[in-house]
Image (spheres, helix red, strand yellow):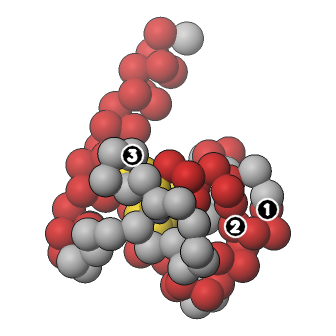
Amino acid sequence: MLNKIGKIGKLNKKEGRELAKLWIEKDIRWCEFDEPHSCNFGIFPENAHRHKKKWYRGKPDELRWSIKQVARLCNNSHNFIEFDAKKTAEFFERLRGSEEISS
Ligand SMILES: [Zn+2]
């Protein structure tokens, strides 16, 4: 159990580092949500994923920081899409196009 937590913690840290690099590389410095909303990116910038955490398990780690799979969002817009699978899917389709992954 301890080992498992250690492993996940390590991967989460790596993901954070890789995403920070990705945003610089792609020059994405703002909230990417494309509908009018009360943006609080300045206070709460977040990394949003196309799929739930479970989906990435057992797949290559790199998917977690691949541009098709992630977006930079503020906390408000992240909350807005996160609990609605349809909204999440539609947003990523608009922003990144199809994900080109067979799962
Ligand atoms: Zn925002």
Q: Which residue is mark 1?
A: 85
Residue 87 is left or right of residue 51, and the answer is right
Q: Which residue is mark 2?
A: 88
Look at the numbered disc 2 and give the secondary structure of its residue: helix
Image coordinates of residue 42 in percent, x first then y, are: 31, 53
Image coordinates of residue 6 in percent, x first then y, are: 40, 20
Q: Which residue is mark 3?
A: 44
Q: Residues within 10 Å of mark 1 (few under 14, many from 20)?
A: few
Residue 48 is left or right of residue 11, and the answer is right
Look at the numbered disc 3 and give the secondary structure of its residue: loop
Q: Disc 2 beta carbon < 8 A from ligand 1?
A: no
- Residue located 67% across and 56% down the image: 80
Q: Nearer the viewer, residue 99 or 45?
A: 45
Q: Nearer the viewer, residue 103 or 26?
A: 26
Image coordinates of residue 44 in percent, x first then y, are: 39, 46
Residues at marks 2 and 1 touching, judged by CB atoms closer than 8 Å: yes
- Residue located 38% across and 56% down the image: 41
**N-terminal label among 1 and 3:** 3
Q: CA distance from mark 2 to mark 3?
A: 19 Å
Which amino acid type is marked by label 3? Phe
The quarter in which the C terminus is drawn is bottom right
Q: CA distance from mark 2 to mark 1?
A: 5 Å
Q: Which mark is residue 101?
A: none
Residue 75 is left or right of residue 82, and the answer is left
